[in-house]
Structure formats: structure tokens, C-alpha cells
Image (cartoon, coloured by chain):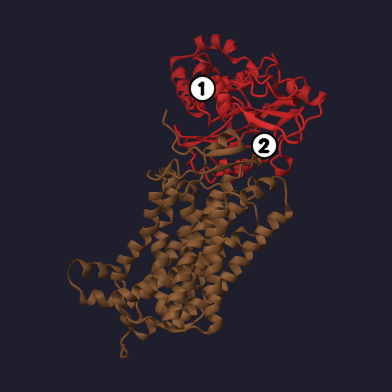
Chain colours: A brown, B red
Amino acid sequence: MEPIAEIASYVGYVYPNETVIPWTVMIVIYPYLTGLVAGAFTMSSLYQVFGMERFKPVAHLSLLTSLCCMLIVPLPLLLHLGHPERAANPMITPHTTSAFAVFGYMASFYLILLVLENWFVFRPYIIQQAQQRKGVMGLFFRVLTLGSYDLSAKAMAADKKWIMALAITGIPGAHGLHGYVGFVFGSLKSREWWSSDLMPPIFLFSAIISGIALLVVIYVISCRLRKVPVDMDCLKGMSYALWGFMMFALLLEGVEFASLMYRAREGIEIIKEYVSGPLIVPFWTMQIGIGSVIPLLLLTFMAWRGTRGTALYNGLVLSAMLVLFSVLMMRWNVVIGGQEIAKTGKGLLTYHAEVIGRESLLTSAILLVAPFVLLWGAVRLFPPWVETEVHAPEHA
Amino acid sequence: MTGSATVPDTDSTSKDSVQELSQEQLSQEQLQRRSVLRFFGAAALGCGAAAAAATAVSSQAATAIDKPEIPGYDWNQHHWGYGIDATRCIGCLRCVEACKIENNVQRDAHHFRTWVERYVYLEGEERPHIDSQADPVNIAASGSEKEYRFANRYKDAKVDKAFFVPKMCNHCTHPACVQVCPVGATYKTEDGVVLIDHKMCIGCQYCVQACPYGARFFDDRLQATNKCTWCYHRITKGLLPACVEVCPVSARVFGDLKDKQSPISKFLRDNRTHVLRPESGNAPNCYYVGIDKEVS
């Protein structure tokens, strides 16, 4: 018989079958990436739907980022499944009472929506390239035009309507996708740590802050690499957005935690033991202290003092990186944390992640880097920058 | 023995009829039998060629979908239930061993279709000490993860109260595991058993998470979830689940709830029973006698 790689050590009494942790670090990465998808889309919607001009420099970049993350989202799930070759079955033969069964439809719908919106947004650029370029790349762009070279005012107006419609549909699409991820956990009554009505909004708001934070970091890095000045007005706007959504995210999480402790249902003793012991580093220190309190204080301070220039730049980038780390730790503490508290309510397990292997830390690192490798290529094919934007000719 | 299920013995009645069958019928029946074997896995091998004859009869009566083709068995005629008298259990763990062998469960300390918990209240302590056969101290006592024994670890302590509690899948009326399965690979049969179709299972382990009893586990040989079936391959042939069969003290009781004279009906009539975690809303179907408030 094959040796089992991951046997959890435990204290107290746990059911014998619980010593193999069912959901590994792959299921930590999966909601993290889905969250980045939803968050980045929110960022683009602020410009596309709500017309916030200051976010124009990141509007197209956030759409591309969302798409690149979305393309990687299925991978952690496929790596986790015992039978990845049956991964399409929830869509082919869905079991309608399962929260999981709907995921395939929602994810596919959203992916199509993202591809369409990206296509409309980059259509003028695609047409320009199709007309200018030769060879393989010329062919590539000619295929992407889908035979339409129409950049007339009428066509552009139609495109704009499409973009608006897709962006509006995308808001419930992206947020529904991620809210559903919260529901997968929140609807399980077998684990007190997960079983909460607040789980979907908690996942949603943490997703939004992770998306905004990601865009801050990517935008700043992209400006550096392209040696162009950062649009400080855009950055300032992002710092406000990050601060505002963080308030909601932290408030919801605080309320959830408070009601869990206050309700104090069966098994609360072991939860208290867990919170005051194994969670000191991953939850209290990393997620709350370093990842939430420090950036929140920093952002508040900067907003209060009206910080500008380099100080704002440095403060916001640092805050954004800490928020990205915090949300990753939040996913870890929810997914792994829930499983470390035994269903017996009388024991605690410790998850030992594999370093190398199918569902390992190494795989996780690769999966976390993969969207940005894709993005690296995508921005070369479809530059999302304001200065490279192709406008329809006036006379057309 | 604690009693027997009431499915007619098809083997003896169908032996004669096999001889009367034409070659054509036989080959047709062999095909049907093959589908039965595929459905229930290798455990159905023991049913013998005679069982094939009855397949023809039952398959005609069977509905077009879902209903399994089992010789002489109609799942609408039965509703199985399971009783556990914890006051009788002596913690010999023959049930665990029998289950592992009968169902070819991984012979390690992390995969069990059934297990036994020991609750020991020591003098002056409020909370019990709980362990199962999978506890490292008990494995050390048996010398192997493949053998099961409760170590005499409290021999020098003053014990106030102690008892054993056998555990397994509760084959709930409203199973959370069935609710969450994205492909319907795990399902509730008409006769009250929760089964898994390993050919459909995608191995997401959502059901493992959803079960509040820790009854499910991931079988790395199948790359799918596995759990107790109340030995469905046995009970549909009129036999008892292996754990019930081997229990030397009749702590485990099994039978048909539709038969008022069955051991389980008698058990439920004669005792006031508990179920585990009734607040979960799963409506479990393993009925306990003699358990304590600490048991969940």
C-alpha cells in the first residue's frame, strides 16, 4: 500500500479518519486566486461602470489581471481532485443540491464574460495590430479581429455599450463567484469554525481588498519596469478604496468571530484553546496584526495627514503587500483552521503541508506565480496602458 | 447471533432453475451479472453462478434506472436500521477487524469504516479520557496498525466509570454528505442505506467535510471517498453486516425496520435510544443504548 504523505498529528481525541486532512493547501490557493479575480474585476468596474476617471490607468490592467488569475483558478482544484478526469462531471451530471455543482457553471460563465470584455476593450488595438503586423503575429491578431475591422463611431459606440453591459453583468458574476466560495464553507454545519452566515460576505470583502491591493502592486511595478511616472491621483484613489473596503472586511470578520465566541455553542472550549494557542502566529500575528492592523493604521494616517508623493507611494505599496499577505493568511486560517479543530470537539489537529508533491507548498508557490507569468505575456500582446491606447480615427 | 435479516435465501432456490435455462438465457444473464458485479465490486463475487438465474427475474421487475439488479432482492421491501448497545460492548474490536477484512479497508490507523471509542472517567476528574483503537498507545499495545487492541493503560488508575462506544456511518435520513456531493456519486437507497458509486466520485472530499461523524475517508487506492455500507453486498443476500456477525456479545444489532419481528425492531421497542448529534438535522439511523452525554 502506498504510504500516506500527510498524516496530521493531534492532541485530545479526534475521530480516527480525521487524521488525514481532506482539504490541503490547494484549497487555500483556490479561494485566494478566485478572490483576486473578483477584486481585480471590482477595480476595473470602478472605471468601466461607475465612471471614476482617476482609475483609468489601471482599468484595462485590472481586466487583464482578472483574466490571467481566472485561467489559473481551476488548476488547484484539478490538482486536488482524486479523479481530475471527471472534473467536468459536476457540469455534465450536476447534483443540484450541492453548492459545488454550481461552481462549474458560474466559473465558465464568468470566464466567457471576462474574455468577451477583454476582447471588446482591446478591439481597437487588435485591429491596429492586425493591419500593421506581418507574419505569425499578424495572423494571430487577424484571427482575433474575428473579421471585423470596423472602428467607425457607430461601431465604437456599440462596443462601449457592450463593455458597459458586460462590466455590469460582471459585478454580480465576479462577486457571485466568490460569494459562492464563502458559501461552500459557511453552509457546512459539521464544522463550527466554518458554519456561519457571514462567510460569503467575509470572503467577498476580503477578495475585494486583495484585488485592489494586487492592482496597487502590479501598477507600481509596471510603471517602474516601463520607466513611466506613476499617476498619483490614481494611487491616492486606490488607497481610499483599499481603506474603505478594508473597514467592511475587518468589521465583518470581527462580527463573525465575536458571535462565534459569544454564541459559545458546543465545542467552544476547544475553539478557545485553538484561538489562544495554535492561532497566535498565523491568525493573531500574521493575519490580524501584520496583515490588517498595520496597513489600516498606515492608510488611516496617510488619509488623515493628506500624505502625497513618495511617502504615499511607499506607504500604499507597503500596505498593499501586507493586505495581500493578510488575505492569503485568512484563506489559510479558514480552510486549514477549520480542519485543525476536530469534529469531535475534543481535539486539535496539526496540518503538515508537503514541501514537494502534487498538493504541496511548492505547487502552491508555482500556482501563485503563474497568473503573473501569464500577465507578463498578456501585457506584451495587449498593452493595457493609457499611453498605448488606440483611439478610433476621428474621420471614421 | 443477534438475528438475521429477512431477505430470502436465493442461492438454494435458484440452483435448480439454472439447469433449466437455455444457453442463450445464460449468456444474457451472465451479462446482467457482470453489471451487478460492476455495481457492487468484487465483494459480489461470492454470490456464485446460481445467483445469475434470479437476476433475470429481478431485473424484469427493476425500474429502468437507479434500482440495482440484485438477485431476489427488492429494495422497496426493506428499510434497514442499526442498533448499538454500548452497555454490552467489551471493546474486543473483532468488529473493526472483521470490517477491515470483509470490505478490504486500508489496514492502517487512519481509515476505518467502523471504530470503537473508549470512555474512561477517572476518580476526581470531570471529563472522560477518550481513545480509540487508532490511538498510538493502543497500536503500541497490539504491535501493529493491522491489529486492534485496547491497551490496559488505566490499570494503575482509579476508574469511576468506563464504557465502549462502537461508531460508524449513521446512514442518515437527511445525509449532509449526499446533499453536498456535486455529482450525486453518493446517494441514499430506498432501503435506507447511504452508498457511494466509486465510478462517479470525483474525489473532491466535500462529503468528508460535511459528515459530522467523521465516518468518511479518502481511499487513496480508489482516489475516491469510502465509508461503511452496512455491508450492502451481504445484507441484500440475507446476511448480516460483518461487524454484527462477529460481535460476541450482541452489542451490535441489525435488521429490517419494516419487519416488526426483526432484531432491530425489537431493539427499538425494548429500549429508549439515543442518536448522535441530533441537532445536525441529519436524522441518523444508528440507535444507541447506554451512551453518556460526552459521546458525540
Which one is nearer the viewer's eye here, B66 or A131?
A: A131
**Residue B57 seen from this side:** no
Relative vertical location of residue A279 with respect to residue A253 in this rendering, above or below: above
Of helix, strand and loop, which one carries label 1?
loop
Q: Position of residue A258 (x, y in %)?
A: 68, 59
Q: Quadrant of the N terminus of chain A?
A: top left
Of helix, strand and loop, which one carries label 2?
loop
Residue indicated by mark 1: B146
Q: Amino acid at mark 2?
A: Cys
The mark nearer the N terminus, 2 or 1, is 1
Relative vertical location of residue B105 with respect to residue A329 in this rendering, above or below: above
Q: Amino acid at mark 1?
A: Lys
Which one is nearer the viewer's eye here, B38 or A86?
A: A86
Residue indicated by mark 2: B172
Q: Position of residue B101 (x, y in %)?
A: 53, 20
Chain for disc number 1: B
Q: Could you tell me which residue is drawn at 78 percent across and 26 percent down?
A: B268
The crowding category of the residue bearing disc 1, from other C-alpha atoms within 10 Å (few below 14, some 14 to 19, many at least 20), is few
Which of the 4 image quarters holds residue B65? top right
Q: Position of residue B294 (x, y in %)?
A: 73, 36
Question: Are discs 2 and 1 both within one chain?
Answer: yes
